[in-house]
Image: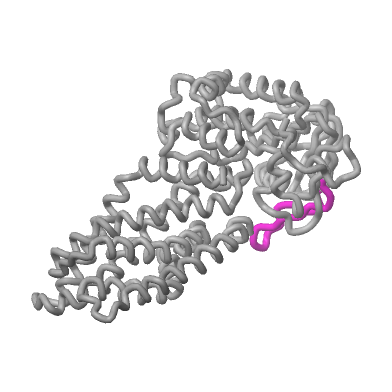
Amino acid sequence: MSDLLVALRKEMLLQWRTRAQMFAIFVFGASALLLFSFAIGPDSASLRLHAAGFLWLALMLSSTLSLAESFQSEMEQRAFEGLLLLPASPVALFYGKALSNWLQLVLLGIGLLPVMVVLYDAGTMRVPGLVGVIAIGTAGLAAPGTLYAAMTSQARAKQTLLPLLLFPLVVPVLLSAVKATSLLILGDPMGQAGAWASLLAAFDVIYWSLCGLLFERVVED
Amino acid sequence: MNADVSPPTSSRPDVAVEASGICRRYGRRWALVDVGFTLARGETLVLAGRNGSGKSTLLRVLSTAIRADRGSARVEGHDLQKDRQQVRRLSALLGHHSNFYEALTALENLQVAARFLGRDVSRPALEERLGEVGLADRADDAVATFSAGMRKRLMLARTLLQDASVVFLDEPYGHLDPPGFRLVDDTIDRLRGRGATVVIATHLLERGAEQSERALLLESGRVAWQGQARDLMREGGAFATGRPEKTGT
């Protein structure tokens, strides 16, 4: 637990020092939302219908940038290897980084919400619900994303490899998150959003447990 | 020294490092072939050899940064394969890479290490460490702004912070100015004074031999010679004396 807090503190400090990158990733996500809206056209009903899907696509695309970036500083001077040799617990290092990546994705998602509302005419009063879905949805991206970012961090084609590995794995998360978000924006007369959110939470538990177990093998071998 | 470790599994308490048949390859090229040696607790070994002879690879294997493909080794009685975390608690590696975060300051980098090690993370304590390596006035500067020599000084500070009983120094004099050489010598003296076992890989053979009791010469990943450090210049072959190699027959 102590190692986890130390790892998390280190991640927060690194994120604060490289906060300009966070802004750049937000601009990337907002640009993606803007471009997707052009693809649909000016029909506000269609825009509103597809808002949730495009929000999550923008979040997924942006997440590959932030996840890959989170290991960039670890690899520059083999800082991560230095921590392992101290020795810091690999499990603590994983959860510290995954939590930090998750927080970054939650902030990114919250930042993209008003952009989506404006561009897709997708205003809703269920903002707390939306933030909640963003929180549990991005958790499903952060854990496997951190694991795969570690795996690909030393590969030459890491920018290509990371989405290639990550996207197929997070399809269930994407589907559940889009469905839950869509119900919150368009209305949920049958009260199904909760079921989709529960499914998301179940995926989160599986991903966070499995990835934590696998991380040591990834960084040691 | 670090007391938060389990008992060693070796029956030779006087031995700090023992390696046998260590082999390691990168792709199809063998960097280490059947390397073996034993180093008593508190001894200092100078590791010599040409560029690419396997010195850094050997130190990285012994410090558990990478795994050997074959062979076995123990550090302070702990098996490198089975007790990696124990070996890491007892050893420190000063390698080619600084292992620092470029975006963080010198002080913050030391704080990160100190927190994981459970050491005093207060500013005065760490500023004292930085002062010992001549970086007290650069405590709040990002490591990204440091020269290679300053990074090496900061690496020395972290190595001392680790308080390890076996210390692997890979080219510790590299990038340093003459006062820096003296700093490395003093650091090695301090480590030896604490009773630490030190392995120094260096091209500055006379300097390394002065600091050491034992010497080992690697050639193409194999042990070419090992003996007393004072004999390195005389017995260590063409490499040690700097004579050109004989070619052909």
- B204 or B89: which is nearer to us? B89
- Would you say B64 lies left or right of A13 here? right
Q: In this view, does B233 lie above or below A117?
A: above
Residue B38 lies, in percent from the top left, at: 85, 40
Residue A123 lies, in percent from the top left, at: 15, 66
- A181 or B246: which is nearer to us? A181
How many circles with numbers are drawn on the protein? 0
- B111 or B247: which is nearer to us? B111
Image quarter of residue A28: bottom left
Residue under the point 54% across and 19% down: B128
- Would you say B188 lies left or right of A153 here? right
- A139 or B156: which is nearer to us? A139
Q: Is B27 within the magenta?
A: yes
Residue B72 lies, in percent from the top left, at: 81, 52
Q: Is residue B190 above or below residue A182?
A: above
Q: Is A80 within the magenta?
A: no
- Would you say A219 lies left or right of A184 here? right
Q: In this view, does B94 lie above or below A55?
A: above
Q: Is residue A22 above or below residue B210?
A: below
Residue under the point 41% across and 40% down: A13
Q: Residue furthest left?
A: A42
- From which residue to which does the magenta span run? B19-35
Residue under the point 60% across and 34% down: B118
Residue B243 in view, yes or no: no
Please tell me whether the stretch drawn in magenta is mainly helix, strand or loop: strand
Which quarter of the rendered picture does the N terminus of chain B lie within? top right
